[in-house]
C-alpha cells in the first residue's frame, strides 16, 4: 500500500497533503480495511474506478443513491484484497464489464482523503483513483438498488455544473487527467 500511494505524482498541494496523510495512516495502523458496514474502522481504503472514453476524454459517472452524488464507480477494498483487484471486481459488479486499464495503466493516478456524505454514518475514505477505458456506446449493466442511473459527462459539463453534485475532489481529478492527456500528445 505504501508503494502504491508514494508512487502517485501529486497534482497540487492538496493531493500532496492527502498522500502524506495516507502514508502516515498506512504506517500507523495495522488495519486499512472496512470490517463492519458502514464505518468500522472509521477510516478505510476505497478503490474508485473512473471510466473514460479515450476518444474524447468524457467520463461515465453513476447517480449514487446513498450519497446523492454523481460518482465514479468503485467501493471499499475487502480485507486482504489488493486495491487493483477491488477496482476490477467493482467494475464487474457495478458496470457489468471487464476493466480495461489501457489509458493510464494499472496503478492509481490520484489519491484523496474524504469524509463521506449520505445516509450511512460518516467515515473517512482513503480513495485510490484508477482509470479504465470504455467507449460511449458501451452498454453498462447498473444495479438499480445502488444507482439511479448513469451518464457520460464531458470535462466542460463537469466544470459548468454545480460542484456539490460530485465527489468534492472530482474536478481536481479531471484536471489531472486532462493535463496528463495533454502532456502525452
Image (spheres, rainbow, N blue to C red):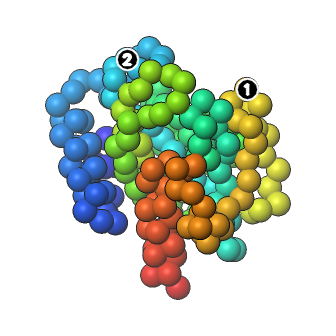
- Image side of residue 55 versus residue 181, left or right: right
Residue 18 position (above or below residue 121): below
Q: Name above or below for residue 141 compared with residue 155.
A: above
Compared to residue 181, the image places residue 111 above or below, namely above
**Above or below, comparing residue 60 to residue 32 in the picture:** below
Residue 161: x and y in percent read 60, 61
Please name the residue shown 45% across and 81% down the image: 183
State the SS at label 1. Answer: loop
Q: Quarter holding the N terminus?
A: top left
Mark 2 nearby-residue class (10 Å; few <14, some 14–19, many ≥20): few
Task: Using the rendered image of the protein, determine whether residue 107 is visible from the camera's viewpoint.
Answer: no
User: Looking at the image, do the residues carrying marks 1 and 2 touch, with CB atoms under 8 Å apart?
Assistant: no
- The image position of residue 44, as x and y in percent, is 37, 30
Image position, residue 13 (x, y; %): 25, 62
Residue 80's quadrant in the figure? top left
* Sequence-earlier tag: 1 or 2: 2
Q: Secondary structure at mark 2?
A: loop
User: To which residue does mark 2 refer?
Assistant: 40
Q: Is residue 48 visible?
A: yes
Q: Which residue is mark 1?
A: 145
133 sits left or right of 81 in the view: right
Residue sitting nearer the eye, 83 or 127: 127
Residue at the spot x=68%, y=74% of the render? 56
Q: Which mark is residue 41?
A: none
* Residue name at image x 31 percent, y 57 percent: 15
Amino acid at each position: 500500500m505504501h508503494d502504491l500511494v508514494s508512487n502517485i505524482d501529486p497534482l497540487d498541494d492538496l493531493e500532496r497533503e492527502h498522500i502524506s496523510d495516507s502514508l502516515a495512516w498506512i504506517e500507523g495502523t495495522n488495519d486499512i480495511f472496512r470490517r463492519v458496514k458502514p464505518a468500522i474502522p472509521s477510516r478505510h481504503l476505497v478503490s474508485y474506478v473512473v471510466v473514460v472514453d479515450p476518444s474524447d476524454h468524457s467520463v461515465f459517472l453513476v447517480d449514487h443513491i446513498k450519497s446523492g452524488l454523481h460518482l465514479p464507480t468503485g467501493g471499499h477494498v475487502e480485507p486482504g484484497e489488493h486495491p487493483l483487484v477491488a477496482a476490477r471486481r467493482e467494475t464487474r459488479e457495478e458496470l457489468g464489464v471487464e476493466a480495461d486499464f489501457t489509458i493510464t495503466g494499472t496503478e492509481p493516478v490520484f489519491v484523496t482523503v474524504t469524509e463521506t456524505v449520505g445516509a450511512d454514518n460518516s467515515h473517512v475514505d482513503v480513495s485510490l483513483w484508477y482509470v479504465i477505458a470504455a467507449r460511449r456506446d458501451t452498454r453498462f449493466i447498473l444495479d438499480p438498488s445502488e444507482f439511479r442511473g448513469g451518464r457520460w459527462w464531458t470535462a466542460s459539463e463537469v466544470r459548468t455544473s454545480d460542484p456539490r453534485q460530485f465527489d468534492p475532489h472530482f474536478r481536481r481529478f479531471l484536471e489531472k487527467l486532462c493535463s496528463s492527456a495533454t502532456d502525452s500528445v
